[in-house]
Image (cartoon, grey):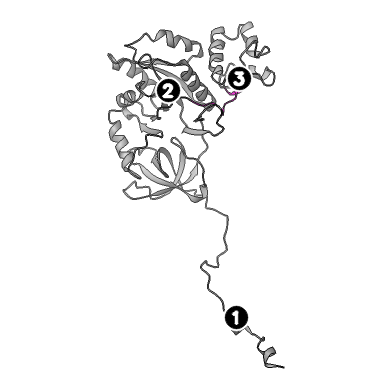
Amino acid sequence: MSPRARAREYDESDVRVRPGRRGSRPRSKRRPDHADATEAMVIAVDRGRWTCVVDGAADRPITAMRARELGRTPIVVGDRVGLVGDLSGAVDTLARIVRVEDRKTVLRRTADDTDPFERLVVANAEQLVIVTALADPEPRTGFVDRCLVAAYAGGLAPVLCLTKADLADPEPFASQYADLDIPVIVTRHDRPAEGLAALEQVLAGRVSALVGHSGVGKSTLVNALLPDAERAVGVVSAVGKGRHTTTAALALPLPADRGGGWVVDTPGVRSFGLAHVTPDEIPAAFDDLAAAIEECPRGCGHLGPPADPECALDALVERGLLRPGRLAALRRVLVALR
């Protein structure tokens, strides 16, 4: 055998094993189920950090990050989440959100009526308190109607709060919603205690989101309900990255001696885009109308003649099972979808 042929003969000792950077442990898609995770509520969101509180410990906010396995799962104020890690709430500690529980209600909107992208505003709120000034600025029926659509579609019970009643009579505006059986709270600057007591009664023990245009008195209401609101906001701001988000919702606890509950203060919005809502979702939110719309023809917008001449809701009025004023109020809200 030639020297050149012998040069091609190798055995195990000639093999060099290059050390790898990764271990030999096989990768697995299995993830821990975190059965021991502690349930908490998200009360603020700030640039990749979520402020959470465990039930019964509202004075101990916990800063958390989203676990990698959740990917881009949206997490908003009001979400019930599972936490693991350091739950002490101490400075410079960080927990992990490993689970987002199913939402009972969702307040959502789009930028406008043609935008297909939904923006989650608040999760699990039981009520939507629509704050509207009776003057300065003038009340806008269209904005209230759109908020009602968002509430009905998301499963929230709407409440209408009319402020600045010392500047204008609340009756003409409130009467437009009387047949929808919406609770109406009236407040005024000269006698603030009167309306505040009624509002506290409605909010007690529940999670309520407040929405309204800038200047309608929403912040004034929050400060009246929560004298320590600025301090509470400061505590939340000090956690995480030290900046209170004025572009996102913030949940604040109501005093336990007044029934408890949470108020979610949302940023002022110009309008609620309703691209995500269909006409069927609105009457379906009413117990007395949900069954009737099943008899409507396909594509019915429930607006009545001439647009929808065969709408089953008109038959309810003819049979005396639905008040004409209630149907008229409902259809005015439905017009907001158009």
First in sequence: mark 3 vs mark 1:
1
Q: Where is residue 123 in the image (x, y as percent from the top left)?
A: 47, 33
The 10 Å Cα crowd at callout 3, few under 14, some 14 to 19, many 20 or more, is some
First in sequence: mark 3 vs mark 2:
2
Q: Where residue 81 is drawn, which disc sits there?
A: none
Dominant secondary structure (helix, strand or loop) of the stretch shown in magenta: loop
The 10 Å Cα crowd at callout 1, few under 14, some 14 to 19, many 20 or more, is few
Q: Where residue 290 is drawn, which disc sits there?
A: 3
Residue that badge 2 annotates = 129
Residue that badge 1 annotates = 15
Q: Residue 278 in magenta? A: yes
Residue pictured at 32% horizontal, 15% vertical: 188
Per the model, the C-alpha gap separating discs 3 and 1 is 76 Å
First in sequence: mark 1 vs mark 2:
1
Per the model, the C-alpha gap separating discs 1 and 2 is 74 Å
Q: Is mark 2 on a helix, strand or loop?
A: strand
| Amino acid type assigned to the residue bearing label 3 in the image | Ala
Q: Where is residue 214 in the image (x, y as percent from the top left)?
A: 37, 24
Magenta part of the protein: which range?
272-281
Query: Looking at this view, is 181 or 56 the one in front?
Result: 181
- Residue 212 lies left or right of residue 117; in this view the side is left
Residue pictured at 29% horizontal, 17% vertical: 193
In which quadrant of the rendered view does residue 316 lie?
Answer: top right
| Amino acid type assigned to the residue bearing label 2 in the image | Val
